[in-house]
Image (cartoon, rainbow, N blue to C red):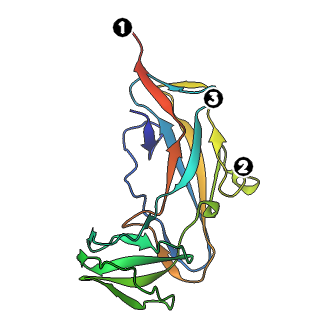
Amino acid sequence: MFTFWANPEMTTEVTSPYPIVYNGTGSVDIVMYYGSNDADEILTSATSEPITLMPINKLEKWESARYYKVGDIIEPVIANGQMYKCTIPGTSGDTEPEWQTKPAAVISSGTAQFISYGAKFVCSDVKMALSRTGLDTADAGGSISLGQSMRGGAPIAIYIRVTNRFNDLRSDTTDPCISIGTNKVILTKRPI
């Protein structure tokens, strides 16, 4: 299976979510290895475009009458640039609450309770490149191309820089807001 690995030998798969914690404004650089540890696997783009890795916003919108568990992170239906973390599990109400933006403000919705968790991460907080020095000139929120097909057994090093634009202590470890995805691809096995 093509995925992210913690090492070039592809023996340790990267955990999801990847733990990134900030203690104020700044950037964190990460290197991961994208590939398959099965040399018989082949990944091919399903279109005429190359295989592309890109940051994807995964933050879910608030929904009425939905059960939320502790740790779920959401944003309002009409985004206000903030994210909210569920602190008391329960079912949200029928109407959307008024979302306070003051840090740690408590917001109730039905039997669920949320706190203002700070500014949300956005795709432009992420840069990716095929080399560490490439991060300095990479486009924020941009994608990287890996060619029309890839064969397993030889990973590609992917360098990622995630930037915290705010002075807050921030973490994306419980319910990731941003993930790295691919365009449409086809996975096949080399015939034996």
Mark 3 surroundings: few (<14), some (14-19) or many (≥20) residues within 10 A: few
**Residue, disc 3:** 147
**Residue, disc 2:** 134
| Helix, strand or loop for disc 2 | helix
Q: Amino acid at mark 2?
A: Gly
Up-down relation of residue 62 to residue 97 (above or below):
above
Mark 2 surroundings: few (<14), some (14-19) or many (≥20) residues within 10 A: some
Distance (Cα) linking label 3 and label 1? 24 Å
Q: Amino acid at mark 3?
A: Gly
Disc 1 + disc 2, Cβ < 8 Å? no
What residue sits 61% from the left and 25% below the top?
148
Q: Earlier in the sequence, mark 3 or mark 1?
A: 3
What residue sits 44% from the left and 87% below the top?
98
**Residue, disc 1:** 192
Distance (Cα) linking label 2 and label 3? 17 Å
| Helix, strand or loop for disc 3 | loop
Percent position (x, y) of residue 154? 51, 28
175 or 130: nearer the viewer? 175
Up-down relation of residue 166 to residue 14 (above or below):
below
20 or 48: nearer the viewer? 48
